[in-house]
Image (cartoon, coloured by chain):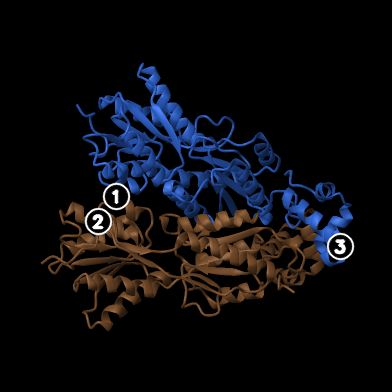
Chain colours: A blue, B brown
Amino acid sequence: MSKNPTIADVAREAGVSTATVSRTLNDPDRVKEPTRVAVQDAVNKLGYTPHFGGRILASNRTNTVGAVIPTMENAVFAHGLQTLQASLADMGITLLVATSSYDREHEEHQIRTLLARGVDGLALIGAERSAEIYALLDRREVPYVLMWTGGKADGHFTVGFDNDAAARQVVDKVVAAGHTKIAMIAGTTEGNDRAAERVAGVRAALAERGLPAPTIVEVPYQIEEGERAAAAFLSAAERPTVLICGNDVLAAGALRAARTHGVNVPDQISIVGFDDIDLARVVEPPLTTVRVPHRRMGTSAAQHLVEWMRTGVKPASILYRTDFIERASLGRPPK
Amino acid sequence: MSKNPTIADVAREAGVSTATVSRTLNDPDRVKEPTRVAVQDAVNKLGYTPHFGGRILASNRTNTVGAVIPTMENAVFAHGLQTLQASLADMGITLLVATSSYDREHEEHQIRTLLARGVDGLALIGAERSAEIYALLDRREVPYVLMWTGGKADGHFTVGFDNDAAARQVVDKVVAAGHTKIAMIAGTTEGNDRAAERVAGVRAALAERGLPAPTIVEVPYQIEEGERAAAAFLSAAERPTVLICGNDVLAAGALRAARTHGVNVPDQISIVGFDDIDLARVVEPPLTTVRVPHRRMGTSAAQHLVEWMRTGVKPASILYRTDFIERASLGRPPK
């Protein structure tokens, strides 16, 4: 049996009788406005969907999957979402996407909203959210996949990659190129476990080598923010020889700062990105970055999430390898 | 009264009695599987939501708005969607976004899906879709806004700009710079009225000046496609002196083609984009382009759509001016 809320749950939540709930749902005009509001609020809050049976049956599927992503504003999630959507569409399922602006409470509200709209499954980004929301998903027996993350999310079905390991790989390459004065322009780590793991990976890899702790600034994932942060490093008394950026958007901003400061990349400073979005290949010089398997993540998340929705059996998590892509923005440190 | 489907409509669609529909919805275990499937299919098809009353009442709002956009793959819709979402969120409304991959049938299926999920309103891109779908929206009395378009969508509530006029403005500037050998790398016009209007505007503006009809190729809005199309023009016997691109993504691809062919922009060929997305400012040289008021479009679409949802009165359409942004990618034609 699924743990969908019952009419009794709605009655309790609204503080009315089940008969009143039933009357409100089936013949609202016979119910006073305040009661109607109370019942409707309870229905929305609990995600009660009376026209779907109690059991998970083919006949009560809505053939919709919900996704909550932090933002549509930069292209980080674009390709992964596109293939997730396309793969689901091939299976006759519509993907409905909400955005949380990297706000955890906002994300949880949207998860509840999607459940109230009767989605059959959910795709979420990262693993960091309240125990309450995971308890709700379990109670409602709604299959969900956590994307863009992996390894560190015990017990959840994840399709992604290890952000920490990828960041360590960046440090390996940067150090191998001869850099020791390393700074990082990270994405805001608050409410973003992927950004936090990238910072942790950089810190740990440097510490293990006995190299000095890097200067790390955190900024929102926006070109202007990367540009401003890079400008500060460029005009610092002790200029770093390489800027490790939390993603390609920040790195593109750093490239602009270097251009406006007349600082040659990579001769005078190296810049490394993360994600390998289209932007990385169109900027000049092209960005050395970490390739994330966006499209494969989207396709396999769709396939296995639907497998879970249809069989009721939680699939095994999938951890993809990331690749370090060497382009012109990383060179040896200046003499 | 709203024209939401009634239990009688569902019964008719499913070919069963209203009593059977009621029993299926309230106590599915008492109904045989085939009947349950038939009723559920009818419910989904008609978007019947029994737990919401017949009238548009505060108490039966779902506080969700649906949007169907062509793609999340490029950043064209990113900022407009983000401000639409943020403005709706400020009003306590969640935006659920589906993508159609520029496929009209797919878009209409998703509009029906969003209606079945009980959205209070819809945001759609462009005006080109079947009369049936507009009839459905009117019948269901669901407020909707058409974005990224304007002027040419009689009777609809649009918040956007005139793609045709903006394209004419591009021709004005390009001709004023001395160009006569003009080619266009347009987005695929099939199922995309915005792309079609940009092509029409370029054709008309050149014809009015008695200038030769431009060579126009249509490609999907992808960097690689813009690069491939530009490469063909660059190696043509009679090379154009300017490439007018359907959007900044195609123009960024054209810049890459010029770089790989060792053709200097703008000394040997000029390139103009459209949209003024972030990409336009990070490529080298920065793109001369048409600035579309993405953020204002999103904010005012949200405000007026909600006004319609709450008052039942369709707002007046809003037509924004576009601005021609001169950057380094447009110069005078080579001697």
C-alpha separation, residue under disc 1 versus residue under disc 3: 61 Å
Tell me the crowding category of disc 1: few under 14, some 14 to 19, or many 20 or more residues within 10 angstroms, Cα based. Answer: many
Res. B112 visible in picture: no
Quarter in which the N terminus of chain B is drawn:
bottom right
Amino acid type for the residue under numbered disc 3 = Lys
Q: Nearer the viewer, residue A139 or A187?
A: A187
SS type, badge 3: loop
Q: Nearer the viewer, residue B106 or A134?
A: A134
Q: Earlier in the sequence, mark 1 or mark 3?
A: 3
Quarter in which the C terminus of chain B is drawn:
bottom left
Q: Nearer the viewer, residue B282 or A113?
A: B282
Q: Are marks 1 and 2 in contact (CB under 8 Å)?
A: yes
**Residues marked 1 and 3, same chain:** yes
SS type, badge 2: helix
Q: Which residue is mark 3?
A: A32
Q: Is residue B77 left or right of residue A99?
A: left
C-alpha separation, residue under disc 1 versus residue under disc 2: 8 Å
Q: Is residue B109 above or below residue A289?
A: below
The chain holding disc 2 is B
The chain holding disc 1 is A
Q: Which residue is mark 2?
A: B255
Asked where in the image residue B224 lies, by quadrant, the reply is: bottom left
Q: How many marks?
A: 3
C-alpha separation, residue under disc 2 versus residue under disc 3: 65 Å
Q: Which residue is mark 1?
A: A282
The chain holding disc 3 is A
Amino acid type for the residue under numbered disc 1 = Val
Q: Position of residue B230 (x, y in %)?
A: 23, 61
Query: Residue at point 84% right, 48% down?
Result: A8
Amino acid type for the residue under numbered disc 2 = Leu
Res. B42 visible in picture: yes
